[in-house]
Image (spheres, rainbow, N blue to C red):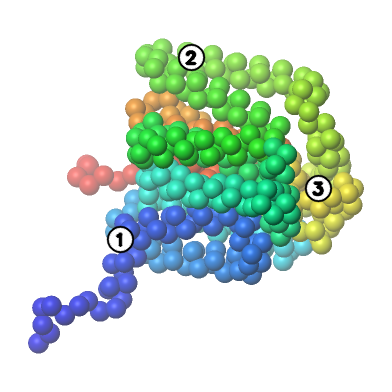
Amino acid sequence: MIPRDTPPVLPEAIKRVLASPKFAASITLVILAVAFGTHLLRSMMGWAGLLGVVVGLVLLATLSLIARRPIVEWHGLLPISIIIFVGWCALSMVWSDYTTVTLAGVAYQVAFGFLAIYVALVRDTFQVVRATGDVLRVLLGLSIALEVLSGILLDLPIAFLKISGSIAELGPIQGVFGSRNVLGLVALIAVITFAVELRARSIPRGRGIASLWLAVVCLLFTRSPVIVVTGLVVLVAAYALTLLRRTPVATRWRLQLALLGLSLVTLVAAWFGRGTLITQLNAGSEFEVRYTLWTEMWRLTQLHPLEGWGWAGIWPTSATPYGWLDFTTGTTQTSGLNAFLDVYFQVGLIGFLAFVVLLALAFVRSWLLASNKRSLVYMWPALILVVLLVTSAAESTILVEFGWLLLCICSVKAAQGLSWRSALAYKPGAP
């Protein structure tokens, strides 16, 4: 006879740990830290170390989902738009001239997508915001500390992290993210996250204000024209959402239509006035490199207009035609510096349309939830998507690593709140 106080067998004990809320909270923090810190990890551990960490996280997340299966809502788990886009990227292995690279790129994309799904399933939106805030406080603080060490205390660049040590000249700084544009993007995401935390009173007021100052300092020292434009758009979007949330429900749709029309007019005006805009932002030299790259990408795209060259994600410098693009611009590029053109180049018109549908559904759902739900936390996914969408015109961050992770999290959360499949969910006791 086994005594009643006998501890559970090891598999049962492990299952309880994997299903516990503390484990879900801990692994969520690690997933976000790895996604935002990929450049730092690659610089210190190489690709092998980073991939080992990602594979380990995927394994732990899989075991945790299995353990939590009875308590996880699986209906309408994944937006069909994500499945179609990733499926087409995977299918591009059929015609890709660099099949191994495409297989690796799709596997890398699927890994971060799966981790995003895990986070979206086991943590609610407010918990995701808190975890993101905790991670970004550490990474932005580390970025400033290393910039001060490099630019003031040592007066030497930290080459392996691509830190130039220019903080004494008021920037531009790169932090632990490899470029000023990516640091600016992360800092802008941090501003939104810290503001939501502060307004929701989920952290002490002093910590929230200090966090905002940290993010703003990082933003200013990047001196990035791309982030200046993105920040202005985010401010306008936040103000528009605030107006919508205060507008009576009966007349809210009219304001939505007015905002849509104004947005379309602004986009058209920005396109025709892009030359003046670039001059005013003093982004001429940087834009010239991008324009040269985009022109050559567009020329090569015409050789495979429907299917593209094959998915790669992060560009391989040794594969054709990416090596030729590096030769054309005179610099080594890891992306097309424009997410939309990058997708068109890699997976053609079909992949481009699938990507646009994915973005449109995620944004419209998130925007409607932010407009109609009382909780302030619903503004976070909508504003994060605004940041990712605007920066997609000058960066391809949304296609890989933390950009792709955030897109998938916001897309899944939006689909959970507004999905046609929710009407098909079985309800116990229903006739």
User: Would you name the residue on which mark 3 appears?
Assistant: 304
Q: Amino acid at mark 1?
A: Ser
Q: Name the N-terminal-most of marks 1 and 2.
A: 1
Q: Amino acid at mark 3?
A: His
User: Would you name the residue on which mark 2 appears?
Assistant: 255
The spot of residue 38 in percent (x, y) is 60, 57
User: Would you name the residue on which mark 1 appears?
Assistant: 20
If the image is split into quadrants, where does the N terminus sit? Answer: bottom left
Q: Amino acid at mark 2?
A: Leu
Q: Is residue 198 visible?
A: yes
The answer to whether the residue labelled 1 contacts the one labelled 3, judged by CB atoms less than 8 Å apart, is: no
Q: Is residue 273 above or below residue 301?
A: above
Q: Is residue 330 above or below residue 223?
A: below
Q: Is residue 400 visible?
A: no
Q: In the depicted view, which residue is nearer to us: 250 or 379?
A: 379
Q: Judge depth for marks 1 and 2 and give the one in front.
A: 1
Give the residue drawn at x 36%, y 40%.
203
Q: Name the N-terminal-most of marks 1 and 3.
A: 1
Q: In the depicted view, which residue is nearer to us: 71 or 143?
A: 143
The spot of residue 398 in percent (x, y) is 62, 44
The quarter of the picture where residue 207 lies is top left
Left or right position of 290 against 347: right
- Calculate the distance from the C-alpha at mark 1 to the C-alpha at mark 2: 44 Å
Q: Name the N-terminal-most of marks 2 and 3.
A: 2
> SS at mark 2?
helix
